[in-house]
Image (cartoon, rainbow, N blue to C red):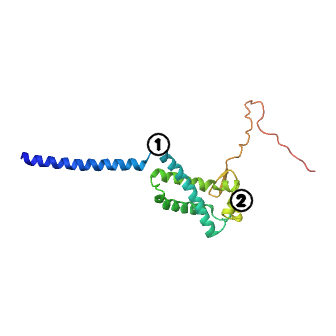
Amino acid sequence: MAHGQDIFAERLARLNDTHGHRQEQQTATARAARGRTPDWVRNMVYPGSLVGACFVGILTVILSRYVMFHMNGAPDPDGDADLTMLMDGGLALAIAFVLRNALNMSSKEHLACKTAGIWIALTCMHNLVHAYPMTWANAFSPEWVERTVEMTEPKSIFFRGMSFTLDEKAPEAEPVNTDPSIPTSKPEIKINRG
């Protein structure tokens, strides 16, 4: 029996040596592939990819609107805004889905960032058209820029065909009257035309 155990122990030693040698080779290969990149750079790659995923979402909306423009022409101001937004968003999601594997952004976090980018572009892209009309006229057409500017307000969020202005100042509130002796109603002025 001792002889069988010795043979078995020698065999295990040979396997461990082979396995250890392969493991050292794999570790050396991984180190060489990583190169001499500093740790802080490697730590910034993931957060940077999340920001990149947001920009991918924004660019997919621009691309989808470009495709829709060449397929359907300039947007119809009297058209259904919900349907237009749904079509732009759906096409942008489809483009983002295709780019998912090409850009290696398939995690849930990347999907959330791409969706946020799509939402930002769907509701705020018109502000860039207001700010840089000549650039957009070169990319799309002057007619497309004119209709976009006509349909939306600058510095606003465009959702379901309505512009919610962000730059508007709140109206001043009337001072509250706490003295009961002062009437709170305004006097009525009658004009007699006789």
Q: Residues within 10 Å of mark 2 (few under 14, many from 20)?
A: some
Q: Which amino acid, by three-letter code, is at mark 2?
A: Met
What residue appears at the point 42 percent right and 48 percent down from the top-left corner? 34
Q: Answer yes or no: is residue 67 visible.
A: yes
Left or right: residue 36 versus residue 81 is left
Q: Which amino acid, by three-letter code, is at mark 1?
A: Pro
Q: Position of residue 173 (x, y in %)?
A: 73, 39
Furthest residue in direction right, as rendered: 194
Q: Residues within 10 Å of mark 1 (few under 14, many from 20)?
A: few
| Picture mark count | 2
* Residue bearing the label numbered 2: 134
What residue appears at the point 49 percent right and 60 percent down from the top-left corner? 97
Residue 125, by quadrant, is bottom right
Q: Which mark is residue 161?
A: none
Left or right: residue 181 versus residue 118 is right
Task: Give the CA distance from mark 2 to mark 1.
Answer: 43 Å
- Of marks 2 and 1, the one in the foreground: 1
| Mark 2, secondary structure of its residue | helix
Instruction: Judge by depth and name the residue closer to the eye, 33 or 182.
Output: 33
Residue 170, by quadrant, is top right
What residue appears at the point 61 percent right and 64 percent down from the top-left corner? 66
Q: Position of residue 113 (x, y in %)?
A: 52, 51
Instruction: Judge by depth and name the residue closer to the eye, 120 or 48.
Output: 48
Instruction: Judge by depth and name the residue closer to the eye, 80 or 123.
Output: 123
| Mark 1, secondary structure of its residue | loop
* Residue bearing the label numbered 1: 38
